Image: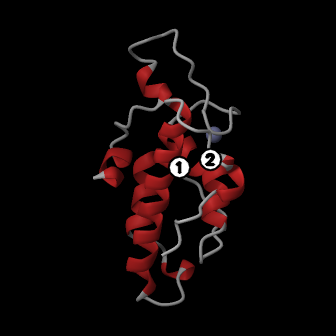
Amino acid sequence: MHLWRIAVDILPTRMQLARFASDLDIVCPLCELALESSLHLFQQCPVPQALWFGSPWGLKIANLQFSSPSQLVDFVVCPPHDLLLDKSQQDQFTLYAALLMDYVWSLRNKVVHGDDKPNWDDLGRGLWI
Ligand SMILES: [Zn+2]
């Protein structure tokens, strides 16, 4: 369900919410370096980039070109074969990527809603499968 929300770009990111409240802060709450869109939050932001790179695949997600969140989700669901060592890793990669994206969204919500600030030293702890 989370991947579907990302793919159709309906997550309430700050860019989406700004369509209804023009005075809203639209900067990414994780890095504070760019506007918070779905594509930024799950691919272009340094926080998910560190998580993607720290994955078993050592993925440099910033080097991949996606023009929309749906292209990113397509990549997650049907990863290119040259990324994986064998076909049996496809499900493992898709599951890991879905968990990563859910983790980023929950991290973002902790920052936005003022819960405890994330401990950046523990970034990704508990994400390993
Ligand atoms: Zn960011």
User: Is residue 101 at all visible to an observer of this figure?
Assistant: yes
Q: Please report the residue visible at 57 percent of the width from the left and 51 percent of the height from the top.
A: 43
User: Image point 47% across, 65% down: which residue?
Assistant: 97
97 left or right of 49?
left
Instruction: Locate residue 54, reporting x and y percent.
Output: 65, 68
- Tell me the crowding category of disc 2: few under 14, some 14 to 19, or many 20 or more residues within 10 angstroms, Cα based: some
- Three-letter amino acid code at disc 2? Gln
Q: Which residue is mark 1?
A: 42
Say whether residue 108 is left or right of residue 121: left
**Residue labelled 2 has its Cβ within 8 Å of some atom of ligand 1:** yes
Closer to us: 119 or 80? 119
Secondary structure under tag 2 reads helix
- Residue 84 sits above or below residue 59 on the image: below
Ligand 1 picture quarter? top right
Disc 1 residue: CB within 8 Å of ligand 1: no
For label 1, the SS is: helix
User: Where's residue 124, x and y in %?
Assistant: 59, 61
Is residue 60 placed above or below 22 in the rendered structure? below
User: Which amino acid, by three-letter code, is at mark 1?
Assistant: Phe
Above or below, 84 against 52 in this view is below
Q: Which residue bears the numbered disc 2? A: 44
Badge 1 density bin: few <14, some 14–19, many ≥20, Cα 10 Å: many
Q: Position of residue 58 (x, y in %)?
A: 65, 73
* CA distance for labels 2 and 1: 6 Å
Q: Residue at left 68%, top 38%?
A: 31
Q: Quadrant of residue 26?
A: top right
